[in-house]
Amino acid sequence: MKSNYRVAYDKGWQDLKRKEPADIARNMQVQYLPQKQQLIVPFLNENYVVDLAKETLVRENDGEMPEISAAILVLHYLSFFQSAAEVTGKWVSLKEIPNGGMLFYPAFHKDAICGLIKAFGHQTGAFLDCAAILGGHPVKAGDAAAYFPVFPKTPLRVTLWEGDGEISANATMLFDPSIEYFLHIESIIALGEYLAKRLIKLAPQASGC
């Protein structure tokens, strides 16, 4: 029996093949190489090569396939969009995203936000160093914050507040509200969790939550 990841990966390819590559490139701001039948997709400071003829997805720098959760996110980013919506430049919590954001927020907070607090709640300088590795840019908010162009049209922003003896550390992850047109709610959650996981993995140590 196929794993849930494998089912999602296979379906991602099926959905992608139904789209016109030129439409994908135009709407999702990725590069299309028609002679090679390849899409070049920026994702967290790396480029991924999606070969439509061979149905392969690899990192451009080393030719290796990424972990399947990342591959699924790339396929969903390329295949889900329903319109030519534009990024708004505004920020909302997952709770404000339609079609389930409020319902799924408690689990998202537990899986992603608390992990960021544990990793960076007492070392916000380390957070900015880790963010830079993933293409994050410092912004003015909280005690430390970074803007991540995760995919070209799905930016995320992470803000941290340091804890001390009296106040607990805290964190938020915000999305551009246009993301609802580019990914379904499960993929939005998975995107946020994947960013958190990558940041936590880079953290020099874990602090108390």
Image (cartoon, rainbow, N blue to C red):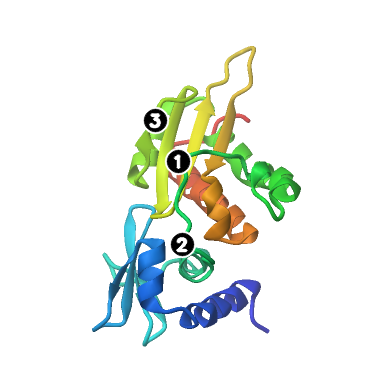
Residue 170 rendering spot, x and y as whole percentages: 60, 28
Q: Number of callouts in the render?
A: 3
Give the labeled residue for mark 1: 89
- Circle nearer the N terminus (2, 3): 2
Q: Residue at x 52, y 68 (%)?
A: 76
Residue 17 rendering spot, x and y as whole percentages: 47, 83
Mark 2 residue element: loop
Residue 140 rendering spot, x and y as whole percentages: 41, 25
Residue 97 rendering spot, x and y as whole percentages: 64, 48
Q: Residue at x 58, y 60 (%)?
A: 187
- Circle nearer the N terminus (2, 1): 2
Drawn side of residue 152 relative to residue 168, left or right = left
Give the labeled residue for mark 2: 84
- Give the alpha-carbon distance from disc 3 to disc 1, as whole Å: 14 Å
- Give the alpha-carbon distance from disc 2 to disc 3, as whole Å: 27 Å
Drawn side of residue 109 relative to residue 82, left or right = right
Q: Is residue 26 above or below residue 102?
A: below
Q: In the image, what residue type sits under mark 1? A: Gly
Quadrant of the image for the C terminus?
top right
Count neighbours of disc 1 (C-alpha within 10 A) and say few if under 14, some if 14 to 19, many if 20 or more: few
Q: Nearer the viewer, mark 3 or mark 1?
A: 1
- Circle nearer the N terminus (3, 1): 1
Mark 3 residue element: loop
Q: Is residue 44 above or below residue 112?
A: below
Q: Residue furthest front?
A: 84
Drawn side of residue 61 relative to residue 168, left or right = left
Residue 9 occupies quadrant = bottom right
Q: In the image, what residue type sits under mark 3? A: Val
Mark 1 residue element: loop
Give the labeled residue for mark 3: 139
Q: Residue at x 34, y 45 (%)?
A: 133
